[in-house]
């Protein structure tokens, strides 16, 4: 658990930064009711395994993807941002920070919380592309089919694939390159709710400048913990709002090592 002193130190680090770049992962959204992959309650330990997001398997047997993921997809489309998403958005709006978010999440919740600069390095669930004609559609137009776990099809008869990055696909190049630039420009890097096990996204914080402070908030340890200035094995939705409140009460900018 973060102590009062930890919260003050983190608030001072935030207050002293101008350009904050954040890498977020599935743990950012568990408090919105969306399971992550690798926690004990995550998808890989409850519903399915990595192969459901394998591109070749999807192309051969799309029904295996939609029957498992369809109902979950529906709940993600309906999910609301949690206190962590809101606090992060307020770092820009209320605290005037130049905030860039590189997210591995495909749920759109950073944007729904009001964050304006969000690079979706694993794509988005909001849109679908036809594998035959390339036509696009909004996933929200298929709520009924998703709830029944049916394969989504374009009017041409082709199968729709969600615009998320499957294993075996390239990451969206523009989003990844913008994320690399934002890491290199940052004077504070935050890593929030990611096991840092999926590459190349997990390597993004390596592009930060030498000496740029790194803060990790993740319930379980990550491979970057040893490099970080501050590490919190806590809930993002509980910790971040406390840090914002501490900033509101006024902290002296500083960058103590925690
Ligand atoms: P992951 O490997 O499941 O890791 C999530 C991490 O978050 C774990 O280490 C948890 O300990 C931690 N965690 C969970 N809840 C919290 C919390 N409330 N506060 C702090 N830490 C928490 O997921 P990654 O994001 O690292 O893996 C990348 C994958 C997951 C990407 O390809 C995503 O597309 C994919 N994913 C996204 C979503 C989503 O968009 N919401 C959901 C599930 C998976």
Image: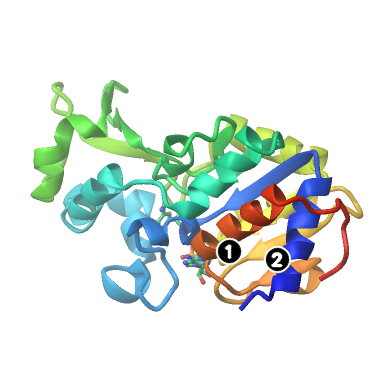
Which residue corresponds to the image point at 32% horizontal and 23% vertical from the top-left? 134
The reply to whether the residue tagged 1 has its Cβ within 8 angstroms of ligand 1 is: yes
Label 1 – label 2 distance at C-alpha: 8 Å
Pinpoint residue 104: horizontal percent, then vertical percent: 52, 49
Residue farthest along the right direction in this orientation: 211
Snapshot colouring: rainbow
Pinpoint residue 95: horizontal percent, then vertical percent: 68, 39
Q: Would residue 251 appear left or right of 85 to someone viewing this image?
A: right
Residue 59 seen: no
Q: Would residue 139 appear left or right of 30 to someone viewing this image?
A: left
Packing grade of label 1 (10 A; few <14, some 14-19, many >=20) is: some
Which residue corresponds to the image point at 20% horizontal and 50% vertical from the top-left? 70
Q: Would residue 2 appear left or right of 118 to someone viewing this image?
A: right
- Residue 139, picture quadrant: top left
Q: Do the residues labelled 1 and 2 touch (CB within 8 Å)?
A: yes
Residue on which the image places disc 1: 239
Pinpoint residue 212: horizontal percent, then vertical percent: 86, 52
Residue on which the image places disc 2: 7
């Amino acid at each position: 658990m973060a102590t009062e002193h930890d919260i003050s130190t983190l608030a001072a680090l935030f207050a002293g930064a101008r350009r904050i770049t954040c890498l977020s992962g599935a743990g950012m959204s568990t408090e919105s009711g969306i399971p992550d992959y690798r926690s004990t309650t995550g998808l890989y330990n409850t519903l399915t395994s990595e192969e459901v997001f394998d591109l070749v398997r999807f192309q051969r047997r799309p029904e295996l993807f939609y029957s498992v993921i369809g109902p979950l997809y529906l709940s993600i489309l309906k999910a609301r941002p949690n206190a962590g998403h809101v606090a992060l958005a307020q770092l820009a709006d209320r605290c005037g920070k130049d905030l860039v978010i590189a997210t591995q999440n495909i749920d759109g919740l950073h944007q729904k919380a009001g964050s304006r600069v969000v690079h979706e390095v694993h794509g988005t669930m909001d849109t679908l592309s036809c594998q035959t004609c390339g036509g696009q559609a909004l996933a929200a137009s298929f709520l009924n089919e998703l709830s029944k776990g049916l394969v989504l099809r374009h009017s041409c008869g082709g199968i729709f694939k969600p615009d998320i990055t499957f294993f075996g696909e390239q990451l969206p190049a523009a989003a990844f390159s913008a994320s690399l630039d934002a890491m290199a420009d940052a004077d504070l890097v935050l890593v929030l709710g990611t096991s840092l096990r999926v590459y190349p996204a997990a390597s993004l914080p390596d592009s930060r400048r030498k000496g740029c402070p790194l803060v990790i908030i993740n319930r379980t340890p990550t491979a970057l913990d040893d490099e970080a200035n501050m590490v919190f094995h806590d809930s993002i939705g509980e910790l971040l709002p406390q840090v914002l409140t501490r900033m509101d009460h006024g902290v002296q900018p500083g960058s103590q090592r925690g």
